[in-house]
Image (spheres, rainbow, N blue to C red):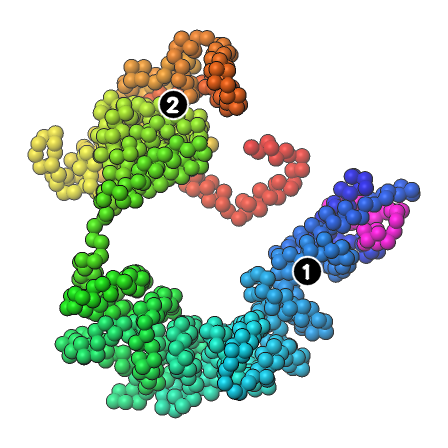
Amino acid sequence: MDVEFTKKIIRVLKKLLEPDFKVKNDVYLNSLLTHLTGSSGEYKHFIWVHFPIEAYLIINVAENGVKVDLDILNKQHIPTWLIEAVTLWESLRKLPPSSILSFTLNLASFICKDEQTFVMLNAPTIKLAYIRLVSSLLEHKSGLQWIISTNYWADIMCVTLGNQTIYITKEGYKFLAMLLDKSIKINEMFCFNVVQLVMAPLSANASCMPRNTITNAIEVRNQTMYQTLCPSLTLITQILEIFLENINKDNSKVFLMFTKKFKLEEQIRNVLLIAQNEEFIFDLNKLLFIISLFDLIQKFGGKEYIEYEKASHEVKLFDIFTDNITKGSVHNVIKLAYIGHIYWRNVKSKMPICVRHCDSPLPVLFENQMLMVQLFPIISVSLKVMGDKEALKILDEDEIREQYVDKMLKNATPITMRLFYHWRNCCQDTSSLFDHATLALNYLVKSKNYFTRDLGITAFQTLIYSLQDSMDVVKKQPQQISFMTKQGNYFAQLLDTISMFINEFSFNWRDSLESFCVLNIAFDFLSIPAWSTKVDNVSDTTVGFIGPMLYAKLHDSCWEVRDTALEVICTIANNANKKFPSYRRILLEADLPSLILKMSKHDGEAFVRTTAIKCMQELAQVSEFWCKLSESGHIPEKIIEILQKETEGIVRSQAATLIATIYEHQDVPAATLSQFYDIMTHAATADLHWEVKVNALHFWEKVINRHLMHQGMIDGTFPKVTFSKEHRKIVTLNEPEVRKRLIKVLNQLSETGCLAVLITALQDDCDLEVSKTATKITKDFVKLLKDYNIGTCDANLSTPPSPLIPFNGVPSPPYSSKTVSVSTDSQYHSLSPLSQLSQNSMSSSPMGQYDDMTDTILDEIISSQDYTLLKDVFNPGDQPSDNYISLRFRQVVTPNDFLKFTYTDLESHADERTKWMDGMNDFGSLLDDILKEYDDNDVNNMDCY
């Protein structure tokens, strides 16, 4: 097939997907379909397609025609186009014109004749898009009637029952629920047929349930039945859950169709007679739970309140819990209580308030009963470890505990209390009591999102008493320690759950007096001799091997391994600084700080060097690590060298942050400090990477804060009095004194070059973040000056500013303290990135250097007979670059000039920048950019980069 001809067909197909595309005549699409499906052996026609741009694409084939390779076209291009079409129309939520839709469906029906293409179009994403497409037709009457008249809904139901993906099944459930909800209004018989099809698997199995005793054969058949019925049960449950979330008159009719005409509840109970699988029983009980709630809505919905004595006779819901407790299905009881919270939230607004008559009428809350059921296993643990007699004794002695029990009894109904006694008789003495309690804690955590504050308080009190009772037993009966320590999973989950509830509800003593006991109980728990109260410091502990292991990983040949090892070290260093000082020994004994320093300069991968410098930022905050690093030489000079010679911006940006960290946490000598000022001036004003500039500006922000702190500022404000080191006496910081100190700060910042850096960064038109950061720092500082009425007449430093120009000299040797002046008018020669060569080496040509190194390398390889080293060792790209950069030196701006600029231009400049940056994210700006892009067809996009 002609390549150009194929391209034209693809262009036509893509034009069909344009939203504003119009077909001049449907005959053209029919003709195109005829040719694509191979009905015509040769192309002998003109195909005219009308475009919005008022142009015509003519597919003109000579009379003798071009033979079409339909196999390639249909297998490669058309299936891809169909997927793009469905995805596009789904995202737009808008169907194409009928002519294009007809063309698409006919084309799809043709290519699906090929099995390979059918498999491609049978992907889950296509099925999902198809379900959503058909679901959109349910939104109007015409679409609903079309679905009823066709059989597509049955196909979607089969796809849903297939459980191919969770997304397909969820969309399928929604579609079928919406179909039943909509169709009941216009065609009840169709709705009946759909429900009948949904119920068919359950009806077929329930009708042949044996009434005799259970045999082994029936148990085997029970498992097979569960696997057969599981998809149908899930489908019925999901449909009824969707109805329960938004119950109304129409879906109530569908609900009644399930329960009355098809006797759903009766069929479920028939299956329950032989159900042995616990998951099978739970699925069946879940359906009964929904039916019971629906019955309550039908009987009591719409009323303001009902009496508990009348309502209790109608509640069959608690029989479900009784049956499961009798069978010993503890897992099902706990899970049913959890879904009870979920379902009740959906129907609570439709149910009346239930009131129990007594001395003072009290509301009976359904959610309280579900919580009580969830707390059964946890309460049983306390009763088990203490015994009934000890429990009664504690209740008599503890007035607060008595109030808690009274509250529980008032909230519980007689039905719930009978459930608890039934639980105690059937489940409390089991060997899995602590396992059941652990499961209850897990579901309690899941349920907390549905709890009111009162429910949270009740649960919290129960958890505290369970922990306290266990600790009391250990104190009084030391022989129980061995038994308690075996229940580590329960106590770990109990402590986690208490912590989660405290964080979720922020309890105080007004909510629960038990909150006073949390710290004491936790201390008692940790004081048990069997628990490990200290970090294991035995020499053969795993902690002792972490350092050597990380040291080895830092020498791994794979850079990802080295980088990950450095991230682990970074985390350890952070914890060693803030949480666990004992971790410092791990890094120091393995001599990791020195190795990290070497990697920050010499590792061959930029990402590894970046992470190494991040590690040093953590290490620089701890005095022990800093001393260890200092043994490797003068650290500041090495960091400055990275900023000068490193070619990767991400590495230099972290080096700038490292200098700021050293400045903040360590005592830096005056000479080194001057070097910091020089190099950070260049980094903030002349570096080509915007992140380097931003991080350097944060360094200057720390410089401002330190000078203000030296003048007495604490936490952003000046106190009333301070101790003056200069005069060795206490000084009152009145307004004149503060103004004098601020003027001193201005003069000091002028000498360091800070004021010049801020003004230069404010005027940076290339990097938005740089200008934004400089504006924020300057505005905060200027606001402080204005608060104390610092004006241009107050600052009289007359030092003239030095010119802000780069020097274009010859390449200088590597950086050292001897080659850089510390005066304010110091000048930097151009420094070579990555240059580690001596001046003698620099005098020779680079190619000469490469030749000498090549000879040496080749001699070594020949002597070792390892030819595989050639490609790794001899790589001219690994040699130092001879591209030199010119460093900008420090500039002095007088306080007068700084104040004049900031007082007159800063506000307007800040407003202009704010509008500019807001405009960058403005929706109107985005639209303008898009229109500009499409209008300027002759613009090369590469010119924008």
* Residue type marked 2: Gln
Along the polypeptide, which appears first: circle 2 or circle 1? Answer: 1
Q: Quadrant of the N terminus?
A: top right
* Residue type marked 1: Leu
Please provide the residue range marked out in magenta.
Answer: 33-58
Residue at 38% x, 88% y is: 312
Residue at 63% x, 70% y is: 157
Q: Quadrant of the C terminus?
A: top right
- Label 2 crowd (10 A; few <14 / some 14-19 / many >=20): many
Q: Compare residues 914 and 654 and report the one nearer the observer.
A: 654
Q: Return the residue at label 2.
A: 644
Q: CA distance from mark 2 to mark 1?
A: 60 Å
Furthest toward the front, the residue is 216
Furthest toward the left, the residue is 729
Percent position of residue 58, x then y: 82, 44
Q: Return the residue at label 1.
A: 95
- Specify whether 179 is left or right of 372: right
Residue 235 placement: quadrant? bottom right
Asked whether 52 falls inside the magenta stretch, the response is yes
- Specify whether 279 is left or right of 59: left
